[in-house]
Image (cartoon, rainbow, N blue to C red):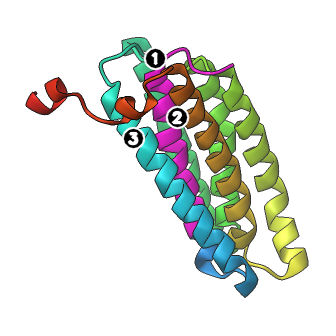
Amino acid sequence: MTPEHVRDAAGLAAVFGFFAMAWFGWAQEGPPRSWVKFLAAGSILSILVAAAGGLLLWRHWSDGTVFDDATGRSFGIIVGVEFAAAGLGAALLAWRKHADAIAAWIAFVVGVHLFPVAVVLEIPAVHIPAALVTVAAIGAYPLAKAKGLKTSAVIGPLAGTVLLVTAAVSLVDALTRLGARPRSALLPSSDALID
């Protein structure tokens, strides 16, 4: 269920942590006042998890990874299609005067793109956040309209929380597999500093 390699688990923590921060940030576009502290806390936790994942990724960059030429190419195509779909859909929504639905559309594209990412990267557990973000995106726009909220204030915390939890679980997974040396794994070796 989890990545085979520590490097890939660390990378997942870094990337999902970064994007969790982005979603918590987007949610601050116009949320109810009582949500601001929660959103700020989500952003801070996301930054911390992303930074820890990034350091661990850097430290284990030379270790094994699922990425090879074929995987990299497939992953690039998936991400390219994701960006194109997100951009075209956002432009169409803006043109049709439904700009408030853009956040839900972007979340939907992100959720859907995670399904093939899970397959290509051989991380079946990524299907869980893929499904959760996709379902949240589908319900966010009508829920926002019903409650008189900005769509970003609804989907932002939902997508942010799913991605933050996934990032944190990936980070814990990577650190746990390092055994007795999780602290040293976060620090560069003297060889890495010399290089």
Secondary structure beneath dot 3 equals helix
Numbered tag placed on residue 168 in the rendering: none
Question: Which residue is depicted at the point 36% across and 14% down?
Answer: 69
Tell me if 126 is positioned left or right of 145 in this view.
Answer: left
Name the amino acid type tagged 2.
Leu
Position of residue 146 measured from the top left corner of the image (x, y, whole percent) = 90, 76
Between marks 1 and 3 in the image, the one whose residue lies nearer the viewer: 3
First along the sequence among labels 2 and 1: 2
Check if mark 1's residue and mark 3's residue have beta carbons within 8 Å.
no
**Crowding at mark 3 (Cα within 10 Å: few <14, some 14-19, many 20+):** many
Q: How many marks?
A: 3
Can you name the residue that lies furthest to the front here?
180
Nearer to me, 182 or 138 = 182
Residue matched to label 2: 12
Can you name the residue that lies furthest to the right here?
146
Numbered tag placed on residue 54 in the rendering: 3
Report the Cα–Cα distance between label 2 and label 3.
9 Å
Report the Cα–Cα distance between label 2 and label 1.
15 Å
Position of residue 195 measured from the top left corner of the image (x, y, whole percent) = 10, 27
Residue matched to label 1: 71
Nearer to me, 135 or 6 = 6
Q: Which residues are magenta?
A: 1-25
